[in-house]
Image (cartoon, rainbow, N blue to C red):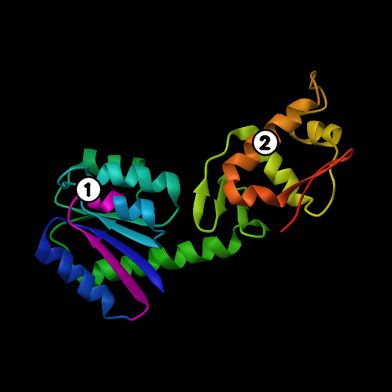
Amino acid sequence: MVKLLVVEDSTQLRELISAYFAKDSAWSVDTASDGYSGLQLVEKNNYDLAILDIMLPGLSGFDICKILRKKSNCPIVFLTALGTEENILKGYDLGADEYMVKPFSLKVLYAKCLALLSRSMENKKDEKCLVCGSVRLYPSRMQVMCEEKEVELAPKEYFLLKVLIENQGHVLGRDTLLDMVWGADFDGSDRVVDNHVKKLRQALGSHGNSIKTVIGRGYKIVP
């Protein structure tokens, strides 16, 4: 099922787009009529594609795009009456994949969305992903996901997790972790590893239990 988000304040247009895509049972469509409702949907769900108006009550489509792009690489299409070069360039600068000006053709919109979705799916297939149980790490975008929710990590915690997952099941000593994460020229106590492991476990929540302490030897991660 392809999950689509449509944020459009015109009831008629919103329902028209939703009905057109929903004709194909492969699509699941969520809609919102204002910026804040759209943001709530973005925060609660993971979408495969988003169609955003710009001039919305509350938050603008630009605001939603900015927030959505931090969370996801899903294709974003602006569908708006704002057709000036300045707005078009701003849309692409914020991370939009397509910018369509009203009035528009539903057939063309649908065709563009299919093309964007196809490229997005191919990119996902090609993207390297490190997996350990419910934890997934995407090196190309330095992103960590736990059960479809993004985990915000500081750089050192991110690279510590990456090293652990790349060597999952194997015990890595503090000195080894220092060399791999902090660098061989690090001049400090190996206890810094313990502090960052603690922070990493806290950030991962219940998934932090997968990082095991091996007394007298170091740490390992297991599914």
Return the residue nearer the eye: 53 or 119: 53
Instruction: Specify start and end residues of the magenta stretch as a single range.
Output: 25-39
Q: In this view, does 190 lie to the left or right of 47?
A: right
Residue under circle 2? Answer: 198
Q: How crowded is mark 1: few (under 14 residues within 10 Å), some or many (20 or more)?
A: many
Distance (Cα) linking label 2 and label 1: 37 Å
Label 1 sits on what residue type? Gly
Relative image position of residue 176 (x, y in whole percent): 85, 36
- Depth-wise, is mark 2 or mark 1 nearer the camera? 2
Residue 185 at least partly seen: yes
Relative image position of residue 110 (x, y in whole percent): 28, 70
Q: In this view, does 66 lie to the left or right of 158?
A: left
Residue at horizontal 37 percent and vertical 67 percent from the top: 3
* Residue 88 shown in magenta: no
Relative image position of residue 6 (x, y in whole percent): 25, 61
* Residue 27 shown in magenta: yes
Residue at horizontal 14 percent and vertical 51 percent from the top: 81
